């Protein structure tokens, strides 16, 4: 006599693989979980179990952050990444070791630009800029944002730390 594929009880008449609807459902759920694969989140790098084919992020927070970074932060101009919306704050090009060129922006002018575009409160503009633009690392070509100051102001800031 044949046995159930899940609980190994004898199969009742009319059943070919599972002894009950409960065992059939359990087998279905086990097959579903076998199809899920461990993946590496493209945003934060953690390992997660993808619930659907085509998922690239461990959470909606990572997916949304990646979308916002692509949407709001950068525009490509040849090999140099430019911060979209901060044209007035553009200072020039910095050269890193190895010849890597990156765009440089005036931090203060970026904040002013946000305030002119609708975020009137200084603290809100700083919070928005630091989270959405300054915090958006897109690789070695990520633009730099410079706090303009004199050498004397720089020394004073270092002494305060």
Image (cartoon, grey):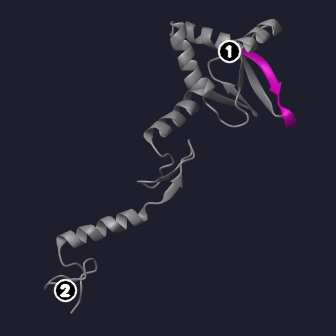
- Image vertical order of residue 120 relative to residue 74, above or below: above
Q: Secondary structure at mark 1?
A: helix
Please name the residue that numbered disc 1 is placed on.
Answer: 107
Picture coordinates of residue 30, whole percent (x, y): 34, 67
Q: Quadrant of the N terminus?
A: bottom left
84 or 142: nearer the eye? 142
Picture coordinates of residue 75, whole percent (x, y): 65, 29
The single residue placed furthest to the left in the displayed view is 13
- Image vertical order of residue 102 relative to residue 40, above or below: above
Please name the residue that numbered disc 2 is placed on.
Answer: 10
Q: Secondary structure at mark 2?
A: loop
Residue at position x 42%, y 54% from top?
52
Q: Residues within 10 Å of mark 2 (few under 14, many from 20)?
A: some
Mark 1 or mark 2: whose residue is earlier in sequence: 2
Check if residue 91 falls in the magenta segment.
yes
49 or 85: nearer the eye? 49
Quarter residue 109 falls in: top right
Picture coordinates of residue 98, whole percent (x, y): 86, 37
Query: Which segment is the magenta one?
Result: 90-98
Picture coordinates of residue 133, whole percent (x, y): 60, 24
Check if residue 137 falls in the magenta segment.
no
Disc 1 to disc 2, C-alpha distance: 74 Å
The answer to whether residue 117 of the structure is visible from this angle is no
Quarter residue 11 falls in: bottom left
How many discs mark residues in the rendered view? Answer: 2
Is residue 5 shown left or right of residue 77? left
Q: Which mark is residue 84?
A: none
- Image vertical order of residue 90 relative to residue 78, above or below: above
């Amino acid at each position: 006599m044949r046995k159930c594929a899940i609980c190994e009880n004898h199969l009742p008449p009319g059943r070919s693989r599972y002894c009950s609807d409960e065992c059939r459902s359990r087998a279905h759920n086990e097959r579903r979980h076998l199809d899920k694969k461990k993946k590496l989140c493209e945003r934060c790098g953690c390992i997660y179990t993808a619930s659907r084919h085509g998922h690239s992020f461990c959470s909606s927070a990572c997916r949304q952050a990646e979308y916002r970074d692509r949407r709001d932060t950068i525009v490509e101009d040849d090999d140099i990444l430019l911060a979209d919306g901060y044209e007035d704050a553009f200072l020039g090009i910095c050269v890193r070791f190895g010849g890597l060129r990156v765009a440089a922006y005036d931090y203060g002018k970026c904040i002013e630009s946000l305030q002119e575009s609708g975020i009137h409160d200084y603290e809100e503009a700083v919070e928005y800029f630091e989270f959405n633009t300054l915090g958006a690392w897109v690789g070695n070509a990520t633009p730099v944002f410079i706090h303009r100051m004199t050498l004397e102001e720089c020394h004073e800031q270092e002494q305060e730390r």
